[in-house]
Image: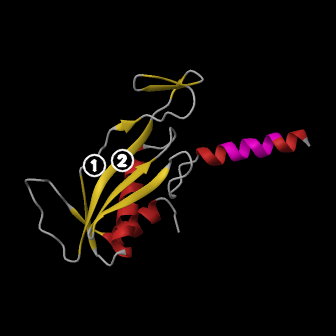
Amino acid sequence: MKQWIIVSLMALTLASCSSEYQQSNALGNGYSDKKIADDSYLVTYKGNQLTAKSKANDFLMLHAAELAVQNGYKYFSLDTTDASTKYLDIYGKQIGDILFLSGVNSQAPQFVAVAKFYHQMPEFSVATMNYAYDAAQMIEKIKRQYELR
């Protein structure tokens, strides 16, 4: 009986550490959004210490693309992407920007952007280096890449 409980707890712990595409959970991992205008949302994706930066960025893009489609738009762009690594302060001791969990440096990527939606493909702006993406194509690409439904 004790072994079953230990195995169950280990499985639960491992499952909570996985980097899934999900709405923000109790630990703050996952995506979140806040509507800031009819055609714009503040979008965030926070991974955990096991999440690759590229995966966190892709999941931010995926959620922005899904919001565009849900709101009746075909294209979207991302502005003010914060590509820096943020540090989670969950358990352990934080000294400056470093969080120590049992002596391990724990870094978790977090990306934040303003997603702006368009019905027509906007012109590329050299001044802002702002690209627009086809939302449906982006959803298909990222879901296929990470084998999501």
Dot 2: few (<14), some (14–19), or many (≥20) neighbours within 10 Å? many
Vertical comparison of 19 with 22: above or below: above
Residue at (45, 60) in percent of width and height: 145
Residue type at tag 2? Phe
The numbered mark, 2 or 1, whose residue comes first in the sequence reads 1
Question: x and y percent of residue 110 in the render?
Answer: 40, 44
Which secondary structure, mark 2? Answer: strand
The part of the chain drawn in magenta is: 6-13
Circles 2 and 1 in contact, beta carbons < 8 Å: yes
Question: x and y percent of residue 105 in the render?
Answer: 49, 26
Dot 1: few (<14), some (14–19), or many (≥20) neighbours within 10 Å? some
Residue 68: numbered disc:
none
In what quadrant of the picture does the N terminus appear?
Answer: top right
Q: Main secondary structure of the magenta part?
A: helix
What sort of colour scheme is used for the picture? secondary structure
Q: Which residue is the extreme one toward the right?
A: 1
Vertical comparison of 98 with 128: above or below: above
**Nearer to the camera, 25 or 149:** 25
Residue at (56, 21) in percent of width and height: 103
Residue type at tag 1? Thr
Residue at (14, 54) in percent of width and height: 129
Say which residue label 1 marks.
81
Residue 13, located in which quarter of the rendered image?
top right
Vertical comparison of 102 with 142: above or below: above
Question: x and y percent of residue 11 in the render?
Answer: 72, 46
Vertical comparison of 58 with 138: above or below: above
Say which residue label 2 marks.
111
